């Protein structure tokens, strides 16, 4: 792959993606931009790219523009980008909630791809959901899918709405795992297990359970039941979670997250 990619917004997610893409495709040229320049410089260093202080300085031969600022920052970016975005450029947005129509309108552009990645992309174990609008050729679909495959397992969706539906699940999903891990570590620490040991044990518990779930043919329900003897220790804990309506709490949290992604398009 010989392309040039502009990374506009160089925070956690953009860095995770660009570093893995660079590792797999070192011949791709990266151009980075952030308003404060610092993170653009840091990312450019990591991917042997060029950091720019002004959008207008990004070489016009750049074919892919990855929009990786926050949805709330997009209007500011769009106001400046609209004047310099080449007509034939492809815009790839990872912003949660921001619709293709809105991107096309604000940038006066036609080719837009929405991707919902997640942070395990930084170790090549992300999940990326992709939606291509109807101006994207099959060549471009293949190219962008390959770029993201360097970072993630890629799932393509035919309807844009599905990207918003999956965002609270795979996009935000790692945060729920980290939060449950935090709760277990904190509790274990209060039971006089040294914090470093508590952290290491819980991290490894999550690693083992995730790998087993990934490698096993069994469903999560079967794997859960294998841990749960009748009237045993685990059964007692699961019963308490059920009594306190864990499933309802998660359902409501996911619904709220979905509502938020709708608001972000406003
Ligand atoms: N984090 C996740 O797990 C995750 C998962 C899926 C999707 N996303 C999406 O990824 C995007 C970035 O999230 P993040 O967590 O990486 O955010 P972040 O760490 O806060 O990074 C945001 C970046 O955008 C830059 N920025 C701010 N205003 C800008 C502008 N006008 N033009 C260009 N760049 C601008 C910031 O620049 P400065 O450094 O100069 O402030 C910063 O580098 C969001 O749209 C989010 O919805 C994130």
Image (cartoon, helix red, strand yellow):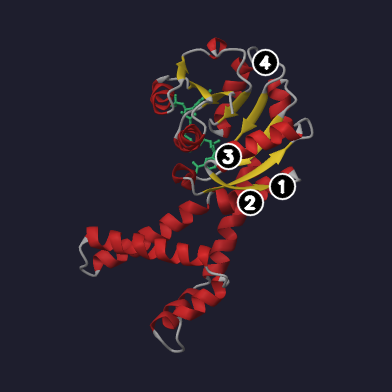
Mark carried by residue 114: none
Look at the numbered disc 2 and give the secondary structure of its residue: helix
Q: Nearer the viewer, mark 3 or mark 2?
A: 3
Query: On screen, 48 above or below 226?
Result: above
Q: Give coordinates of residue 236: x percent, y percent.
A: 42, 82
Q: CA distance from mark 1 to mark 4?
A: 27 Å
Task: Identify the residue position indicated by label 3 in the image.
Answer: 148
Disc 4 to disc 2: CB gap under 8 Å? no
How crowded is the residue under tag 1: few (<14 C-alpha within 10 Å), some, or many (20+)? Answer: some
Disc 2 to disc 1: CB gap under 8 Å? yes
Task: Identify the residue position indicated by label 1 in the image.
Answer: 157
Residue depicted at x 45% and y 42%:
122
Disc 1 to disc 4: CB gap under 8 Å? no
Query: On screen, 207 above or below 261?
Result: below
Between disc 4 and disc 3, whose residue precedes? 4
Q: Nearer the viewer, residue 215 or 188?
A: 215
Q: CA distance from mark 4 to mark 2?
A: 31 Å
Q: Nearer the viewer, mark 4 or mark 3?
A: 3
Q: Is residue 15 left or right of residue 102?
A: left
Residue 263: quadrant of the picture: top right
Task: Identify the residue position indicated by label 4 in the image.
Answer: 86
Between disc 1 and disc 4, whose residue precedes? 4
Q: Nearer the viewer, mark 2 or mark 1?
A: 1
């Amino acid at each position: 792959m010989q392309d040039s990619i502009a990374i506009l917004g160089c925070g956690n997610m953009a860095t995770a993606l660009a570093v893995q893409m660079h590792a797999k495709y070192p011949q791709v040229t990266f151009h980075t931009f952030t308003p404060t320049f610092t993170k653009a410089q840091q990312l450019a260093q990591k991917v042997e790219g060029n950091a720019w202080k002004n959008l207008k300085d990004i070489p016009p031969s750049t074919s892919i523009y990855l929009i990786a600022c926050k949805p709330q920052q997009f209007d500011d970016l769009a106001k400046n980008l609209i004047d310099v975005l080449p007509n034939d450029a492809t815009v790839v947005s990872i912003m949660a909630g921001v619709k293709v129509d809105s991107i096309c309108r604000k940038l006066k552009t036609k080719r837009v791809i929405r991707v919902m990645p997640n942070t395990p992309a930084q170790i090549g174990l992300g999940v990326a959901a992709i939606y291509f609008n109807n101006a994207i050729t099959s060549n471009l679909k293949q190219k962008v899918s390959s770029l993201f495959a360097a970072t993630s397992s890629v799932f393509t969706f035919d309807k844009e709405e599905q990207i918003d539906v999956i965002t609270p699940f795979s996009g935000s999903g790692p945060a729920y795992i980290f939060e449950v891990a935090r709760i277990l570590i904190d509790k274990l620490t209060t039971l006089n297990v040294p914090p470093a040991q508590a952290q290491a044990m819980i991290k490894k518990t999550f690693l083992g359970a995730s790998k087993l779930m990934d490698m096993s043919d069994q469903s999560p329900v079967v794997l859960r039941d294998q841990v749960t003897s009748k009237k045993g220790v685990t059964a007692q804990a699961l019963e308490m979670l059920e009594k306190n309506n864990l499933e309802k709490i998660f359902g409501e949290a996911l619904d709220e997250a979905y509502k938020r992604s709708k608001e972000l398009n406003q």
